[in-house]
Image: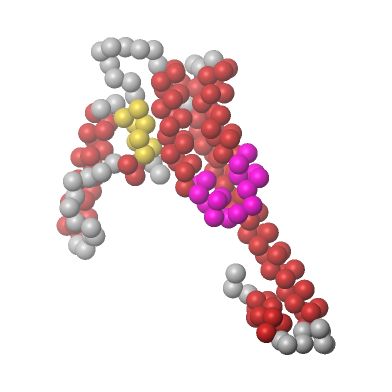
Amino acid sequence: IDADEKNVISEVKEDPTPYRGNSMKEAKEAMDSIESRVKKAIDKEKESTLSSIEEKISDLTEKDEYSNLSGSQKEQVLAPLHQLKQQAKSERYIGNLKNIQTNLGNVYTEQLNQMIELATPEKEDEPKRQFIKQSNIHTSFSKKELETEEDVDEYLSSLREAMVKHIQKNHNIVLD
């Protein structure tokens, strides 16, 4: 936290006689101010994380395949997301909340695949539809950076080709 209050606390810490004057009172006020800022930041991150989880739950429940599932199958599909939601509600650290958000896309994709697996009857002649994250699509583009418009065109062509291959394999691409 970048705050003037840190300077007040540092000064009191270095002061050989902090009990004289108002130093301790100012340090206490500074600590309270910092604590309030940290709590607000945690609450904001928690709210953002919970909102993202709710969005993914809503996306799952709005799929046609979800309505074809039995009650226990629906619970089975949503259980990991509800678990993440409970974890986020009780989390005290911003870094852990950010990790939950980062992993949410993978959990969502796994649950989409599980839902399709449960909702789609076995057919030997047709592969089941699967979901993959856009970030898991790898292109044959060899450059590590784009410098010109031609590079952009080549990259987009390579990306399009890779995406079409996945679509032909009956994969749905989840946009990150």
Number of marks present in the image shown: 0
Tell me the magenta residue range.
86-101
Q: Nearer the viewer, residue 172 or 108?
A: 108
Picture coordinates of residue 3, whole percent (x, y): 63, 75
- What residue do we see at 54% from left, 55% from top? 95
Residue lying furthest front: 16
- What residue do we see at 58% from left, 35% from top? 83
| Above or below for 85 versus 30 | above
Query: Is 111 left, or right, of 7 in this rendering?
Result: left
Quarter of the image that includes the N terminus: bottom right
- What residue do we see at 54% from left, 43% from top? 52
Query: Is 118 left, or right, of 163 in this rendering?
Result: right
Tell me, yes or no, if residue 54 can be seen here. no
Picture coordinates of residue 11, whole percent (x, y): 68, 84
| Above or below for 56 versus 129 | below
Quarter of the image that includes the C terminus: top left
Check if residue 139 falls in the magenta segment.
no
